[in-house]
Amino acid sequence: MAADSQITYNGSKIVTVEKENLKIWHPDDKDNVIIGASGSVREINVIKSLGNILDEVDYLSDEINLTSLTNKTVKAIFKELKEHGVVKDENPVKMNNRYLIAYKSKLYLVTTDGAVVRMSDYAVIGSGSYEAIGVLINNRTDNPKEDLLHAIRVSIKNDIHCDFPIVLTNTKSKEIEIIKE
């Protein structure tokens, strides 16, 4: 999974690689799980502070799947966002953000209304997603890391809301790689 490092608000931008500010992270310090988020920084802050975002029993029994994410993880996310006043208890309840959850070799998209979609190969969210999806559809190679870097570099060139450094990680280690340019 990869992300740019720009945070944009009210016509201003912050570029940061402080671990607390990254748009992708390993929740609960689990190396085989990554969450990526796009949208409201406040919402990302709340979700990052949510301990055990994945149900621990499901995680330990290797049962992280669409059902677990829909019935437990998304429910926990909405509950936490409501408690922090980030989302209102309206019908339908909507988050500000979209999330990607990678567990081992599986990838799931969580939409703003809480729908969970298992992705077959790749997904993009956030600023620069139009550019990135175009690259991934048309220029795929056998090197996923290079494909991600190419997609984000194209996004950075065209979208004013994206910028270096690029942050990369995977579900095989907790190591985070920073690509400065």
Image (cartoon, helix red, strand yellow):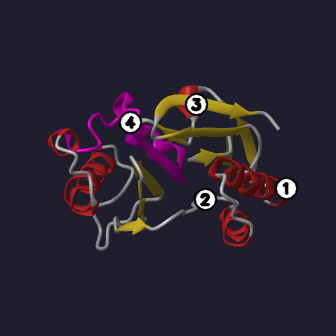
Q: Is residue 16 at least partly visible in the picture?
A: no
Between 105 and 174, the one lying in front of the other is: 105
Nearest to N terminus: mark 3 or mark 4: 4
Between 104 and 180, the one lying in front of the other is: 104
CA separation in Å, label 3 and label 1: 23 Å
Q: Nearer the viewer, mark 2 or mark 4?
A: 4
The amino acid pointed to by label 3 is Ile
Compared with residue 73, is residue 60 higher up or lower down, i.e. above or below? above
What residue is shown at x 39% (from left), y 38% (from top)? Answer: 32
Label 2, residues with CA under 10 Å away: few <14, some 14-19, many ≥20: some
CA separation in Å, label 3 and label 2: 20 Å
Residue at the disc numbered 2 = 126
Residue at the disc numbered 1 = 157
Compared with residue 52, is residue 146 higher up or lower down, i.e. above or below? below
Residue at the disc numbered 4 = 27
| Element type where label 4 sits in the image | helix
Side (left or right) of 151 relative to 26: right
Q: Magenta span covers which residues?
A: 27-56
Compared with residue 155, is residue 175 higher up or lower down, i.e. above or below? above
Residue 26 is labelled as none
